[in-house]
Image (cartoon, grey):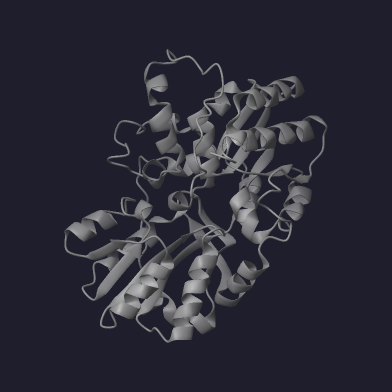
């Protein structure tokens, strides 16, 4: 497939790996922010092919994974109401709340539906004027424009039985929170290319300057990731900290002006809790005052729900890059994709799910499985990250 085969070429991958091996003379810890990048790194064995000096730390960039438990419980409470048609992308249905998930609500009689666009939910609202239709709007800056446009259209069309349960989070404040943590080991970042395709790159130079870390914007194919790592290692070795765009075929510096204008109209910045991490100031969006009547949290009065995380799930430490998934005692035991304790195991972009799928045998046999001798670069479309 054109534009996939080219970015999975094993000869080019080996060339980039050789350059990384030649450049790395001391230990460096690099965090890939996006869960889609994590999945690609683990699937293709990129982390095992890097020199021992270069460690990849998996960041909090899985939107399903960082949706806080209390938002899941609010979704469950709304979805269980008889007058509600609750719409969501499919990856949220098995994310565990305190005692249930959306699949169980559906099996108990709740009208829970998988949709492929928030506009599908708006169309359902127009077709069912006697029902309340709620769309579960989660994710990073990538999917926020579509959700903003849907609310804008609902107001323009006068559709009053539609609402949005909002849990949008923003990447730059999360990077700042990671760097300010006393346990931080990160020395450079691979930024999420799809986020920057919407927002541009202007928010990152202040982070580079404040924290003295290189940030390289990258994509999701093996060569994209290897090129991002190569550039980051070169900066670290040379004592530089700059913003570099290694994904110019997708990311213009200004981002998408039309999408940014829609976001500025419909949303406003707010403090937001991240699952397993906690509250990060000004790290999310909520509906602006003129659209607040489309806020499902307000409409169904579920703002007072507060919850506690599982005592044995260490997904918060995984999301902060403090441990690898297999270092959690519940990994592969009490916590599996079929019976997940945390969202990092249930999400297709979660680090725990990636390790379970591609590394579990290796860890179960205490290293009996040898690292790959060459990149596993079977072409695969980039993950539909949010």
Q: Is residue 139 left or right of residue 244?
A: left
Q: Which residue is painted at 57% across and 60% down in the image?
A: 141
Q: Which residue is painted at 51% across and 72% down in the image?
A: 149
Image quadrant assignment for residue 106: bottom left
In the image, residue 78 lies at what x, y percent?
A: 30, 69
Camera-side residue of 26 and 260: 260
Image quadrant assignment for residue 298: bottom left
Q: Residue furthest left?
A: 108
Question: Where is 141 relative to 130, above or below?
Answer: above
User: In this orientation, does residue 172 appear?
Assistant: no
Question: Where is 312 relative to 307, above or below?
Answer: above
In the image, residue 1 lies at what x, y percent?
A: 53, 39
In the image, residue 97 lies at what x, y percent?
A: 32, 54
Camera-side residue of 115 and 268: 115
Number of disc labels: 0
Question: Where is 234 relative to 177, above or below?
Answer: above
User: In this orientation, does residue 318 appear?
Assistant: yes
Q: Is residue 180 left or right of residue 290?
A: right
In the image, residue 79 lies at what x, y percent?
A: 28, 66
Q: Residue furthest bottom?
A: 158
Question: Where is 283 relative to 346, above or below?
Answer: below
Q: Residue furthest front?
A: 2
Camera-side residue of 262 and 300: 262
Q: Which residue is painted at 30% across and 78% down in the image?
A: 127
Q: Is residue 235 left or right of residue 170?
A: right
Q: Which residue is painted at 55% across and 16% down in the image?
A: 373
């Amino acid at each position: 497939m054109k534009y996939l085969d080219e970015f999975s070429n094993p000869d080019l991958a080996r060339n980039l790996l050789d350059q990384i091996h030649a450049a790395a003379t001391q230990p460096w810890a690099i965090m890939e922010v996006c869960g889609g990048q994590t999945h690609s790194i683990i699937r293709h064995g990129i982390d095992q092919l890097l020199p021992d000096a270069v460690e990849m730390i998996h960041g909090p960039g899985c939107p399903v994974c960082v949706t806080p438990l209390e938002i899941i419980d609010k979704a469950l409470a709304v979805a269980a109401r008889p007058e509600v048609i609750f719409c969501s992308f499919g990856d949220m249905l098995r994310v565990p709340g305190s005692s249930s998930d959306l699949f169980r609500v559906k099996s108990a009689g709740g009208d829970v539906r998988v949709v492929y666009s928030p506009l599908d939910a708006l169309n359902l609202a127009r077709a069912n004027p006697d029902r309340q239709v709620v769309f579960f709007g989660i994710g990073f800056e990538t999917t926020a424009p579509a959700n903003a446009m849907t609310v804008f259209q609902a107001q323009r069309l006068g559709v009053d039985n539609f609402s949005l349960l909002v849990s949008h989070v923003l990447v730059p404040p999360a990077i700042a929170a990671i760097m300010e943590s006393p346990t931080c080991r990160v020395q450079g970042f691979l930024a999420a290319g799809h986020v920057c395709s919407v927002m541009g790159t202007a928010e990152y130079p202040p982070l580079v300057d404040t924290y003295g870390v290189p940030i390289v914007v990258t994509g999701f194919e093996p060569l994209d990731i290897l090129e991002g790592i190569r550039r980051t290692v070169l900066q670290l070795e040379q004592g530089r900290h700059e913003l570099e765009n290694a994904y110019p075929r997708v990311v213009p510096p200004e981002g998408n002006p039309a999408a940014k204008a829609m976001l500025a109209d419909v949303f406003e910045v707010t403090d937001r809790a991240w699952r397993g991490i906690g509250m990060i100031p000004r790290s999310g969006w909520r509906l602006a005052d003129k659209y607040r009547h489309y806020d499902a949290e307000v409409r169904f009065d579920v703002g007072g729900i507060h919850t506690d995380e599982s005592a044995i799930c260490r997904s918060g430490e995984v999301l902060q890059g403090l441990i690898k998934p297999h270092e959690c005692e519940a990994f592969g035991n009490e916590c599996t994709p079929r019976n997940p304790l945390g969202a990092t195991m249930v999400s297709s972009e979660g680090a725990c799910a990636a390790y379970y799928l591609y590394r579990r045998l290796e860890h179960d046999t205490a290293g009996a499985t040898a690292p790959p001798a060459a990149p596993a670069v079977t072409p695969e479309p980039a993950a539909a990250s949010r």
